[in-house]
Amino acid sequence: MTDADRAADLTRLCRTCGVCCNGVMFAYVEVEKSEMRADTRRRLHVLEAENRFTLPCCEHGPEGCQVYDDRPSICRSYTCALYDEYKETGEELDRKLMRVERIKQLVATIRARRRGAADHEWLPRAISEMLAVGKPTDVERELLLDVAELAMRLQRDIGWSPKPIEKAPEPGD
């Protein structure tokens, strides 16, 4: 496999996946004032006062990232375990894409069942709680196994560990 072939495969894996773009792992993406073209900033709906935009990214669709060549530096620098493994070994691209597909199926199932819940921070928080304490506080019972599987796959396949959940101070602390 040539370096060009591997680079093309890595781009395909990244653009096909988009788990870091779809609001599952992160609720926001912070951007520098000087990065990206003005039209890209408008398309991403960057909140200029806060230097960030909310996820899911409006520019990530069925064909992948639509601003891939002008994406923010934080997006350029982020790599997941699947990406890193393929970059290192060049092996099992199809199996990695199947893992991505399962993650995307779980996300679609969870979101379909939570129709009407517009809180873009809910899913990253629920996954963080699942990994930290074993049971999210506001996950409907029929979603619990799907959220648990998604949390496990994000940790195992993507290599993602959420920020620790801030524990409320105990009385008398």
Image (tube, rainbow, N blue to C red):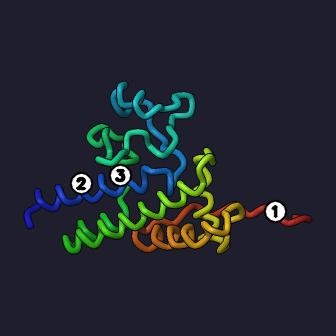
Q: Which residue is mark 1?
A: 169
Amino acid type assigned to the residue bearing label 1 in the image? Pro
Horizontal side of residue 48 vs 41, given as left or right: right
Residue 120, given in percent of the width and then of the height, sits at 58, 47
Q: Is residue 125 above or below residue 43?
A: below
Q: Residues within 10 Å of mark 3 (few under 14, many from 20)?
A: few
Amino acid type assigned to the residue bearing label 2 in the image? Thr
Amino acid type assigned to the residue bearing label 3 in the image? Ser
Where residue 19 is drawn, which disc sits there? Answer: none
Instruction: Inspect this view and state whether residue 106 appears.
Output: yes
Q: Which residue is mark 2?
A: 11
Q: Is residue 131 above or below residue 119?
A: below
Asked whether the beta carbons under mark 3 and mark 2 sit within 8 Å of each other, the answer is: no
Residue located farthest toward the left when viewing the structure as drawn: 2
> From mark 1 to mark 3, how far is it between C-alphas?
35 Å
Q: Is residue 22 above or below residue 162?
A: above
Q: Residue 125 or 147: which is nearer the viewer?
A: 147
Q: Which residue is mark 3?
A: 77
Give the number of the mark in front: 3 or 2.
2
Asked whether the beta carbons under mark 1 and mark 3 sit within 8 Å of each other, the answer is: no
Picture quadrant where residue 69 is located: top left
Q: What is the tally of numbered marks visible in this picture?
A: 3
Could you tell me which residue is drawn at 67 percent across and 71 percent down?
135
Residue 6, given in percent of the width and then of the height, sits at 16, 62
